[in-house]
């Protein structure tokens, strides 16, 4: 049979005929028991075979072909019987067929099968369809005519009942995760097969989510050695990244594209008919291919597959986000684009100052400049009505007071002393998460620290942050850039906001005194005040302008007076000193702007329900002609400040 399936994959019509001849009588007999009508049974079998051969590339193990084929028959029968409002017979049949599933390893699952048979009927159906037939939650909900949340509840309660039942027959107590692992025990082997993990890599993350998604991460001995993979509830790659390991002669871009297309087809063959290659970016030693779903010439937001292939032909990144089976239609009438630009020019503009670095392609060097800003530059407009879709907070309504007059404290030299690290803590090495090579990341933990056992996301996050102190130090100046305590801070003090403010101001006056002439304190609203901690933002101000995104952010414990977090400005004080706003031009002299375009795009609706997230709307956005994001207008030169990132 394996040989015939391989030949069928290659399009061999004789092999397809042989497989059809072998399985069709059994399929017809089974379909007839459901449909009670020969014609309906033949229609269901015909649809089953068409879908099976259309998606044959999805089948990982040819020996499971019969079970896989039967799964498709069940789905088609369910949908057909749903039209006739009689699915009870099929539900009973599935229960009777339970022990036939996974018959190659049935002896390993006997206790599990017995436990499932003891569950309530609703829980049985959810467990069997999800874990044995690999149906997704929404598919089961559609098949059984029940809400998604009901199916999720049945799965949750079914697993809980399974655990209790299995504990009666298994010598050692079972946790909820053990039941999941029994149902999905092959996922780790499958993940390792996909990524070919080197033997010396250590498994750091092994997480099985409630909805069937599984995530794994391995780490090597150095910073660049690591593999992450996430599998969906059918064992297909959802997200995957690894370092290059293959060496050899570079292949052509056409060959790399073929590799990317083959990888996509192996994982999601059904997506091929929906996708188009929408972006191809050549990097230093690899090429990134983005396949997306395009409607009326515009890619659908949030539905794509990104695949990166190295020059020797190795896939090192794969991200899949799905497609829409029922994509939206192009609106028949669009709002005039010139009115969108008129709305921009006639709207409210704010004169402010902002610091920029090299990520803004229009800025030759880092520094501060005065700019005209408009919320409409960040806005999305309904393409049919022209109405703005989002609300933005008005930063201009925030109030600020001068930096407190405080005396500097005795200055400490060592980084540990500045942060508050004592002899009960030890420094340890950890793979740095800092992407900026100008900084060094330091880590401390208690000397008697015992990491919690396990490799789930919860355990992984705890091992990285619980009872940890992390800091960043400028490699060139050796100056402390930031630090944060991930600990519970207990004490009997009950400091006020004002007392905490003095502590924060004294720290800045002691270690960053050159900034204090330019700092103002943001006044907090009543709802921003917390009982046990005090947060402060000290904003940079020069020549009457508050500099956006340049501030000290500090967190003080009201229980102990300890400084729990410090974030310093990105901009050097020298850039603040040389900022001069005397040559600002009136806005009317700078408008209209050149190089602007009103772009059309499909925008995904991220709503409160799963149904909302399946919606798509057609919107306008104001961008540069090459699609770059616009920050504002340089108030001196009139040049547009934009970024391609």
Image: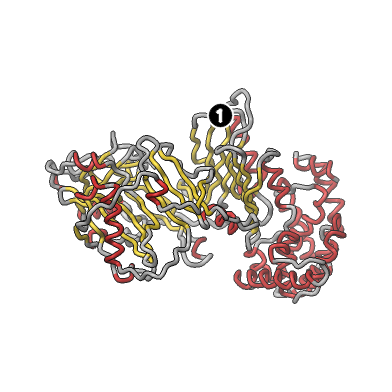
Q: Which residue is mark 1?
A: 253
Q: Residue at x 71, y 71 (%)?
A: 158
Q: Is residue 58 above or below residue 360?
A: below
Residue 97 falls in which quadrant of the image? bottom right
- Relative to 610, is 576 on the left or the right? left
For residue 108, side relative to residue 133 (left or right): right
Query: In this orientation, which residue lies closer to the viewer: 12 or 134?
Result: 134
Q: From the viewer's perspective, tell me whether residue 47 is left or right of residue 502.
A: right
In the rendered image of this protein, does residue 164 appear above or below residue 269? below
Residue shown at the point (37%, 69%) measured from the top left: 493
Above-or-below relation of 206 to 226: below
Q: Residue at x 26, y 39 (%)?
A: 367
Q: Visible in this render: residue 11?
A: yes
Of residues 514 and 350, the one nearer the viewer is 514
Residue 76 visible here? no
Query: Where on the picture, by quarter, is residue 480?
Result: top left
Looking at the picture, how far across and down is residue 500, in whole percent? Answer: 31, 63
Q: Quadrant of the C terminus?
A: top left
Q: What x and y, as percent, mark residue 330?
A: 45, 54
């Amino acid at each position: 049979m394996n040989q015939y399936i391989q030949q069928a994959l290659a399009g061999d019509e004789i092999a397809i005929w042989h497989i059809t001849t072998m399985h069709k009588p059994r399929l017809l007999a089974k379909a007839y028991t459901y449909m009670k009508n020969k014609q309906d049974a033949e229609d269901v079998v015909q649809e089953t075979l068409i879908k099976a051969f259309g998606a044959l590339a999805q089948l990982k193990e040819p020996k499971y072909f019969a079970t896989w084929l039967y799964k498709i028959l069940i789905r088609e029968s369910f949908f057909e019987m749903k039209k006739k409002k009689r699915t009870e017979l099929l539900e009973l049949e599935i229960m009777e067929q339970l022990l036939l599933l996974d018959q190659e390893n049935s002896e390993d699952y006997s206790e599990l099968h017995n436990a499932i048979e003891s569950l309530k009927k609703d829980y049985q159906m959810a467990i069997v369809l999800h874990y044995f037939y690999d149906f997704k939650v929404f598919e089961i909900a559609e098949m059984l005519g029940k809400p998604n949340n009901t199916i999720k509840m049945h799965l949750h309660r079914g697993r809980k009942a399974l655990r209790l039942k299995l504990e009666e027959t298994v010598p050692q107590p079972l946790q909820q995760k053990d039941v999941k692992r029994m149902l999905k025990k092959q996922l780790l082997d499958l993940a390792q097969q996909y990524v070919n993990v080197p033997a010396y890599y250590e498994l750091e993350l092994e997480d099985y989510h409630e909805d069937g998604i599984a995530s794994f991460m391995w780490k090597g001995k150095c910073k660049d050695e690591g593999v992450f993979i996430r599998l969906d509830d059918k064992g297909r790659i959802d997200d995957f990244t690894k370092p290059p390991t293959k060496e050899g002669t570079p292949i052509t871009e056409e060959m790399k594209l073929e590799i990317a297309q083959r990888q996509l087809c192996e994982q999601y063959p059904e997506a091929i008919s929906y996708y188009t290659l929408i972006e191809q970016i050549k990097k230093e030693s690899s090429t990134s291919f983005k396949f997306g779903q395009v409607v009326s010439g515009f890619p659908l937001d949030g539905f794509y597959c990104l695949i990166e292939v190295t020059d020797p032909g190795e896939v090192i990144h794969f991200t899949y986000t799905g497609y829409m089976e029922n994509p939206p239609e192009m609106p028949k009438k669009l709002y005039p684009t010139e009115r969108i630009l008129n709305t921009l020019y006639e709207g409210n503009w704010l004169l402010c100052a902002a610091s920029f670095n090299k990520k803004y392609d229009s800025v030759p060097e880092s520094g501060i400049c005065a700019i005209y800003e408009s919320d409409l530059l960040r806005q999305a407009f309904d393409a049919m009505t022209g109405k703005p879709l989002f609300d933005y907070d008005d930063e201009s309504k925030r109030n600020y007071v001068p930096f407190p007059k405080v005396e500097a404290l005795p200055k400490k030299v060592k980084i540990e002393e500045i942060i508050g690290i004592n002899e009960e803590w030890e420094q340890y090495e950890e793979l740095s998460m800092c992407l900026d090579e100008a900084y060094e990341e330091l880590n401390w933990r208690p000397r008697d620290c015992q990491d919690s056992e396990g490799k789930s996301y919860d355990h992984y996050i705890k091992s990285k942050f619980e009872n940890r102190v992390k800091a960043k130090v400028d490699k060139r100046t050796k100056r402390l850039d930031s630090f944060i305590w991930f600990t519970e801070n207990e004490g009997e003090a009950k400091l006020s906001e004002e007392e905490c403010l003095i502590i924060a101001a004294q720290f800045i006056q002691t270690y960053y005194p050159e900034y204090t002439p330019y700092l103002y304190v943001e006044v907090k609203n009543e709802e921003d005040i917390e009982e046990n901690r005090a947060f402060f933002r000290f904003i940079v101000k020069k020549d009457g302008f508050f500099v956006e995104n340049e501030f000290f952010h500090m967190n003080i414990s009201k229980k102990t007076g300890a400084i729990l977090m410090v974030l310093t400005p990105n901009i050097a004080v020298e850039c603040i000193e040389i900022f001069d706003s005397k040559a600002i031009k009136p806005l009317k002299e700078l408008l209209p702007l050149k190089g602007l375009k009103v772009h059309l795009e499909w925008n995904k609706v991220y709503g409160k329900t799963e149904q909302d997230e399946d919606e798509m709307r057609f919107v306008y956005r104001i961008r540069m002609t090459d699609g770059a994001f616009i920050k504002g207008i340089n108030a001196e030169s009139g040049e547009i400040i934009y970024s391609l990132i």
